[in-house]
Amino acid sequence: MGPSRKKTYPCHVNKQIAYFNDTLYCELDIYGNGEKYETPDGLNSVNLKVMYFYRPSRSGPWAGLTYSDNAVGWYCVYEGGPGAPGRISKEKADSIIRLWRIKN
C-alpha cells in the first residue's frame, strides 16, 4: 500500500454498504467540507450523511443514525454544529453537494 494522501476538501469522505442477516440493509455516503466546530465533547467535522435504507432502519444495526425515525428510502443528515438543521431533504443534500462542488 502506498503512502496515504491528505484529503482535499470539500470531498466525498467515505462510503459504506451494510448487509444485515444476509440482506442489503443500507448504503451510507459521507461528504465533508473541511470545516470544524467545537462541542463540549471536543472538535468535530462538518459533514453531510446521505443514506439509503432498503429496509426499515430500526430493523438493523444503524438505527441510531436515523435518531427516532424508522426510515425507509433516503435519509440525509447535515452535521454542522449547534443550530445546524440535522435531518434535511434529499433535495437539500443534493444542493449542498453542488454548493461544495463535489462531483457525484
Image (spheres, rainbow, N blue to C red):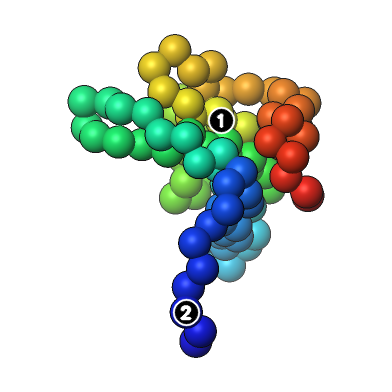
Locate residue 2, reporting x and y percent: 51, 84
Which type of secondary structure does the marked residue at label 2 adopt? loop
Q: What amino acid does circle 2 point to?
A: Pro
Q: Which numbered circle lies on residue 11?
A: none
Toward the top, the furthest residue is 83
Q: Which one is nearer the viewer's eye here, 51 or 15?
A: 15
Q: Is residue 2 visible?
A: yes
Q: Which one is nearer the viewer's eye here, 19 or 102?
A: 102
**Callout 1: few (<14), some (14-19), or many (20+) C-alpha neighbours within 10 Å?**
many
All told, the count of numbered labels is: 2
Q: Is residue 57 visible?
A: no
Residue assigned mark 2: 3
Locate residue 103, reporting x and y percent: 78, 48
**Callout 2: few (<14), some (14-19), or many (20+) C-alpha neighbours within 10 Å?**
few
- Which dot, 2 or 1, sits closer to the camera? 2
User: Horizontal placement of 62 versus 30: left or right?
Assistant: left
Residue assigned mark 1: 77
Task: Report the residue at 39% width, 17% height from top.
Answer: 82
Which type of secondary structure does the marked residue at label 1 adopt? strand
User: Horizontal placement of 101 versus 17: left or right?
Assistant: right
Q: What amino acid does circle 1 point to?
A: Val
- The image quadrant of residue 16 is bottom right
Q: Which one is nearer the viewer's eye here, 84 or 86?
A: 84
Task: Report the residue at 58% width, 53% height from top.
Answer: 8
Locate residue 19, reporting x and y percent: 57, 62
Q: Which one is nearer the viewer's eye here, 14 or 24?
A: 14
Q: Earlier in the sequence, mark 2 or mark 1?
A: 2
